[in-house]
């Protein structure tokens, strides 16, 4: 298949592109041209500005793609600027479980329906992250219902190359005895590893599915469980204080993500606790 990837040069975009190539697809990467990649001559490249309609029009008019994977769209206007111009048979949008209002134990795709919320055409700075992602899905559901689209909803994606360094924050604070403020230390939360996040999107390119779909490792874990592991592994002691540095996952409610729809397509996610401690070990060793 002829696949256009918008944003695929860092974090879980890299294993996603590698999987697409391994599966025999012809891949074109579209970026602003500022980041190098390791794909060499195995991919084609186009340079454009994602938020500029004229840039999109000048680069993609007259071109057809079997699938477009859009990892860099955030808001409803991002959706409109692309889908009003791009010619493709399938559009895969990188959404987020942040669209749920709120997440909860056994969160299913039907818990947020973009067809039932008032659509606001907005730019990225107009609303917080969760709200602009909702309006992006509203645009897909209400303005482009006849387009063959998938909205992939992930919780926190973590891995060794995670540029957000949110999980690293907890490990480093424990090991260095730095005070941190955690407001949800016992809340069970879901995560997905970067490699699996990339592979699942690649898996969807030829599947007969439309609409939103969850992706998440099986099971949940709390920050207390992870901190306890770091303490036992290192002999260090976490310093918890309301005056400490605010932890990255603060304000997250207790939740789990249902992935039965993905299972129905034949994709089985890994068990979270089978790999997350290895990732914590990596951070401990850094």
Image (cartoon, rainbow, N blue to C red):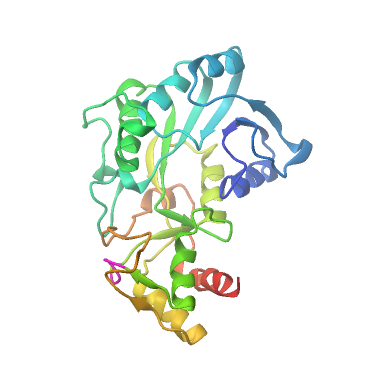
Q: Find residue 150 and report its horizontal and vertical position in percent.
A: 43, 35
Please, which residue is most extreme toward the front here?
A: 243
What residue is rendered at 24% in x and 45% in y? Answer: 111
* Front-lying residue, 40 or 210: 40
Q: Quadrant of residue 4?
A: top right
Give the left or right position of residue 159, taking residue 79 as reference. right
Q: Quadrant of the N terminus?
A: top right
Is residue 184 one of those drawn in magenta? yes
* Front-lying residue, 269 or 129: 129
Please, which residue is most extreme toward the right here?
A: 41
Q: Find residue 3 and report its horizontal and vertical position in percent.
A: 61, 31
Q: Find residue 22 and report its horizontal and vertical position in percent.
A: 69, 45
Is residue 122 one of those drawn in magenta? no
Magenta stretch: helix, strand or loop mostly: loop
Is residue 271 among the parts visible in the rendering? no
Give the left or right position of residue 199, taking residue 232 as reference. right
Q: Find residue 131 and report its horizontal and vertical position in percent.
A: 29, 38
Give the left or right position of residue 121, taking residue 196 as reference. left
What residue is rendered at 21% in x and 31% in y? Answer: 116
Q: Quadrant of the C terminus?
A: bottom right
Q: Is residue 22 above or below residue 275?
A: above
Q: Quadrant of residue 241?
A: bottom left
Q: Which residues are magenta?
A: 182-186
Q: Is residue 43 above or below residue 80?
A: below
* Front-lying residue, 182 or 206: 182
What residue is rendered at 55% in x and 45% in y? Answer: 203
């Amino acid at each position: 298949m002829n696949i256009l990837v918008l944003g695929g040069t860092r974090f879980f975009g890299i294993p996603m592109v590698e999987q697409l190539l391994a599966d025999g697809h012809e891949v074109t990467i579209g970026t602003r041209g500022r980041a190098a990649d390791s794909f060499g001559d195995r991919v084609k490249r186009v340079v454009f500005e994602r938020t500029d309609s004229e840039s999109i029009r000048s680069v993609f008019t007259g071109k057809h793609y079997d699938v477009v994977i859009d990892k860099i769209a955030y808001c409803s206007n991002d959706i409109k600027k692309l889908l009003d111009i791009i010619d493709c048979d399938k559009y895969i949008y990188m959404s987020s479980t942040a669209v749920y209002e709120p997440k909860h134990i056994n969160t299913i795709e039907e818990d947020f329906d973009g067809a039932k919320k008032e659509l606001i055409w907005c730019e990225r700075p107009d609303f917080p992250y969760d709200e602009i992602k909702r309006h992006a899905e509203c645009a897909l559901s209400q303005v482009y219902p006849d387009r063959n689209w998938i909205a992939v909803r992930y919780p926190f994606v973590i891995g060794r190359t995670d540029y957000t360094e949110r999980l690293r924050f907890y490990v480093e604070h424990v090991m260095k005895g730095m005070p941190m403020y955690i407001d949800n230390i016992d809340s069970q939360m879901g995560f997905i590893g970067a490699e699996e996040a990339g592979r699942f999107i690649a898996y969807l390119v030829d599947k007969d599915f439309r609409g939103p779909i969850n992706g998440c490792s099986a099971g949940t874990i709390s920050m207390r469980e992870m901190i306890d592991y770091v303490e036992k592994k290192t002999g260090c002691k976490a310093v918890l204080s309301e005056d400490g540095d605010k932890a990255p996952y603060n304000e997250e409610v207790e939740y789990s993500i249902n992935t039965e729809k993905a299972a129905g397509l034949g994709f089985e996610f890994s068990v979270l606790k089978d790999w997350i401690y290895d990732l914590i070990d990596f951070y401990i060793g850094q």
